[in-house]
Amino acid sequence: MFIYYGLALLVIFLDQLTKWLVVNNMKLGERISISEPYFGLLSHRNKGAAWGMLEGQMWLFYIVTIIVVAGIVYYFHKEAKGEPLFAIALMMLLGGAIGNFIDRVIRKEVVDFIDVLIPIVNYEFPIFNIADAALTVGVVLVIIHILMDEKKNMKKKKVS
């Protein structure tokens, strides 16, 4: 089980390293184009949750994050044994939650820097970071796990 915690630690490390690089090598608002106009690095700070919601409510983020982290660890130890996809999903969620929590505690804001324009629909996706990406991947994997588990349970019901 502890190998999975290594995944969470890797997410936290990569998240904090990339944020440190942005803070120390880019001016706030500076953009480095990687694939114009679709992908770049944009030094941005977020004092709220996703898309800047609840700006300035740090106390709420502290409480919610501590509860979420406790819940993830609980579910990991109680429900993820023998379920590698679920274990990976939970560790992605854990790494992402802790990565952004570190920013909120130390900087009082979250460093975002990944800037993506979605072609065809020409949608400027909200700027995000590695922790945010890990949270998204974790949620998608949890949904896949739930769907696969439901399918497995349906087959069991048909057999019995």
Image: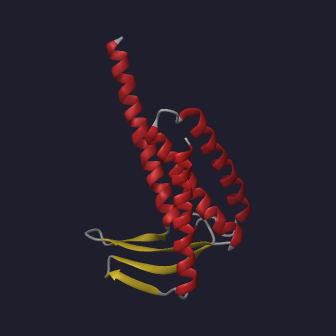
Q: Locate the C terminus by quadrant.
A: top left
- In the figure, is residue 93 to the left or right of 153? right
Question: Nearest the camera: 56 or 65?
Answer: 65
- In the figure, is residue 20 to the left or right of 149? right
| Labels in figure, total | 0
Question: Nearest the camera: 9 or 41?
Answer: 9
Q: Residue furthest front?
A: 3
Question: Nearest the camera: 13 or 36?
Answer: 13
Dividing the picture into quadrants, the one containing residue 57 is bottom right
Q: Residue furthest top?
A: 160
- Residue 135: x %, y % from top left: 50, 56
Q: Residue at x 46, y 55 (%)?
A: 136
Q: Residue furthest left?
A: 120
| Figure coloring | secondary structure
Dividing the picture into quadrants, the one containing residue 120 is bottom left
Where 26 sits versus 20, above or below?
below
Q: Residue at x 70, y 71 (%)?
A: 106
Q: Locate the N terminus by quadrant.
A: top right
Q: Residue at x 51, y 86 (%)?
A: 29
Dividing the picture into quadrants, the one containing residue 99 is bottom right
- Residue 109: x %, y % from top left: 64, 72
- Residue 42: x %, y % from top left: 47, 80
- In the figure, is residue 102 to the left or right of 121? right
Q: Residue at x 57, y 69 (%)?
A: 16
- Residue 89: x %, y % from top left: 48, 47
